[in-house]
Amino acid sequence: MASPRAVLFGAGTSGPALPVCDHYCGVEPRMSKSLQLQAEMGPVFDVTLDNEDGAPVGAEVEQAHRIAALVAGPGNRWGRVGVRLLPWGHARFGDVAQAVLRGTADAKFKPAYLMLPKPGSLAEVEAAAAEIDRLGGAAIPLHALVETHGALRDAFAIAAHARIESLSFGLMDFVSAHRGAIPQSAMGVEGQFDHPLVLRAKLEIAAACHAAAKTPAHGVVTEFKRTEALAQAARTACRRLGYTRMWSIHPAQIRPIVEAFAPGADELEQALEIIVAAEAAQWAPIRHRDTLHDRASYRYFWDLIERARRTGAALPADLQTAWFG
């Protein structure tokens, strides 16, 4: 029997199934601890090792070698470790990319993705991708960080690029790029959801990703000690703005983000009931709790089930076996 995904989506019509949390770190002790935490929790979040803001100025290549050793080492248990490179145009972009790619060439796991920070346009993404491909990284997905006016202008074209898997929103640099016209409050946990220019950017990125079946990743919340404020921001990003992934910059942020992006127990129960009934009806329309459903809503509920799995939810054993093996 064909899987629900194959029936409902066919081939190549659904976005990548990325974990809902992307945890950034660049200082060596924190990078190692993040890998340890990921090994314990499972692949419910990615770890991105930072070779841009996390690298000492002038020591970017040395940082790249440290990162490559961590990606290639035994601490990378799940193969869900990515690397943020330097911006395209930086004098050491090629050296850093080469160090990461060569240092992981014979490893069990290559980088799960390479993040391109601060592209100014589609043309810069294309140039960076061509250089990475030339250096041997053609099989590694690329993520791009939209934090400039040019990247936002080209968001739909960048999302549609064949090498791009996900777009992230770079809040701090985006606000700074407005030369003081957007107040500092728009960088905060509440203000970033209120200012019209920031909100417009977030919606544009989410729409661009969904149009191209790619993953939109919401950016940072810096107030890591205000757990409920962080959780509310994550729920807003997920439920109102259409984001399916969010950055963490402190280990204490990971669990609240994963929990906020996870479907509720009642939502998952409803989704399971509907997909089981739809499968029994051979995907013809059904009636469930006095509401009619067909393949359009089946796709929604199947995506919800898959998101529940990515956030660590356990499915009934028989359905887990039948649908996922």
Image (tube, rainbow, N blue to C red):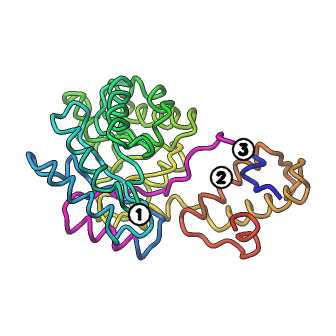
In the image, is 192 to the left or to the right of 26?
right
The foreground one among 163 and 312 is: 163
Q: Residue furthest front?
A: 106
What amino acid is at disc 3? Phe
Closer to viewer: mark 1 or mark 3: 1
Q: Which mark is residue 253?
A: none
Image location of residue 110, percent across then percent down: 39, 56
Q: Which residue is mark 3?
A: 9
Q: Please state which amino acid type lies under the numbered disc 2.
A: Asp
Which residue is tagged 1?
Answer: 108
Instruction: Tell me which residue sits at (72%, 74%) in the image.
Output: 316
For label 2, count other residues whose C-alpha is less than 10 Å away and answer few (under 14), some (14-19) or many (20+): some
**Marked residue nearer the N-terminal end (2 or 1):** 1
* Start-end of magenta stretch: 9-38
- Where residue 290 appears, as percent x and y from the top left, is 87, 55
Residue type at mark 1: give it.
Lys
* 23 relative to 319, above or below: above
Q: Is residue 238 left or right of residue 80?
A: right
Mark 3 and mark 2 lie on one chain; the one further toward the N terminus is 3
Please tell me how crowded label 3 is: few (under 14), some (14-19), or many (20+) other residues with Cα within 10 Å: few
